[in-house]
Amino acid sequence: MTNKRVNKIMIIVVLFLFMVMGIGYSYLSKTLGVSGNVTVKNGATICKENLGVAVPEGKLCKRAEKLHTEVCNQSSSSYYCSGAGHKTGENIAYGNCGTSGELKSGDAFDCDVNGDGVYNSSTERFYYVSDYYDTTSKSFNNDYATLIYYNNIKTGVPDNKATFAYDSSDENWHGPQTGYAELPSTREWSKVTLLNNPRQLLNEKGETTTSGGTLGTFDYTDKVARLLTVQEINEACGITVRSAKVGELDTCEYLLENTYYSTSGLKFGWWTESARSSNSNRVWRVGGFSRHVGDYNAHDSSGYGFRPAIDVAKINILY
């Protein structure tokens, strides 16, 4: 066989292999959803670049290896997950896999808050919201991050059906003095603590009054987590709380996990720390029905729960 014939055969073989590889990659891309850092397989969203990353000692949080998912079981064309564009029966993946060296709203993390050495993706899932908002100085602290839990809480453990009043007195200038007792303490989450406590209370305008009274400080006592402020939501989602527009939280879908957003059997949403300025008994809350931040009566215990936010130094986050 001549060298020319051998070379021709080799070229044909190489071209054939490239064709097979191309078809294979195309097939995998379509069936597994391969795209950059994300692979979708059997309904699960895998963060490829986050898999098996060694966690240095002292790091509280590491990026999630797999995103949480829920099935959209709603059918309204305007409200819930279906109103946000999800088809009924479709999987909703919450949060982002993230980009190394950057922190963006919705980046998913697993945080070893209970100190057992395990980053439990099921019960220790948090989402980066924004830099920490200092309600005393009324400014963001870029050395600390605010992370929100994936679920509501009852006696320090996750419970997406538990609801509590913000303040059973139905006055909005005292802080969350009824339901805050449900938030985790050092007994449940021994590795986190509040950056500032007591905390100055603010309304949605960043002021210290409501039509009912003066907003003072609130002491979370032995708690290691707090409620999110509307200032942090504004920063994360690019909205202005008090507009209460349907769908304004579509840019922050992760805030709606484990709510009525996906499934009618769950509860409406969760309370923020912030009172409404022009009222004496209304408090801002995140709702899965209209996908917005609206206000509700402080004494109501039927629809809204308590969702912990934690304050974490960025040097303690592996990102």
Image (tube, rainbow, N blue to C red):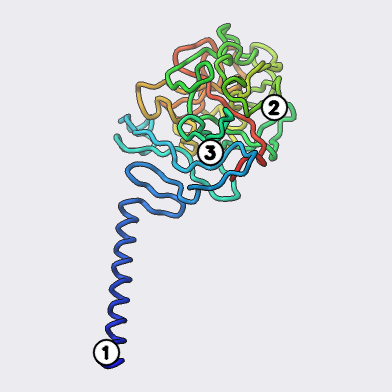
Q: Residue at x 51, y 24 (%)?
A: 294
Single out the residue that lies furthest toward the left. Answer: 1
Per the image, the residue denoted by label 3 is 109
Determine crowd level at label 2: few under 14, some 14-19, many 20+ residues with C-alpha closer than 10 A.
Answer: some
User: Taking 17 as reference, is 246 left or right?
Assistant: right
Which residue sits furthest right?
137
Decide if residue 300 is in sight here: yes
Give the mark, 3 or 2, whose residue is nearer the N terminus: 3
Q: Residue at x 49, y 36 (%)?
A: 252
Label 2 SS = loop
The tag earlier along the polypeptide, 2 or 1, is 1
In this figure, which residue is indicated by the disc labeled 2?
Answer: 135
Name the residue at 34% across, 33% down.
72
Where's residue 90, x and y in %? 32, 38
**Left or right for 247, reference 276:** left
Label ID, residue 56: none
Q: Place residue 280 in its image quadrant.
A: top right
Choose between 297 and 187: the one closer to the eye: 187
* On-image quarter of the N terminus: bottom left
In three-dimensional space, the C-alpha distance between marks 2 and 1, rounded to whole angstroms, equals: 79 Å
Label 1: element kind: helix
- What's the residue type where badge 3 is placed? Phe
Q: Which residue is mark 1?
A: 5
Q: Say which of 166 and 23 sits in front.
A: 23
In front here: 120 or 171?
120
Q: Is residue 129 above or below residue 178?
A: below
Q: Nearer the viewer, mark 2 or mark 1?
A: 1
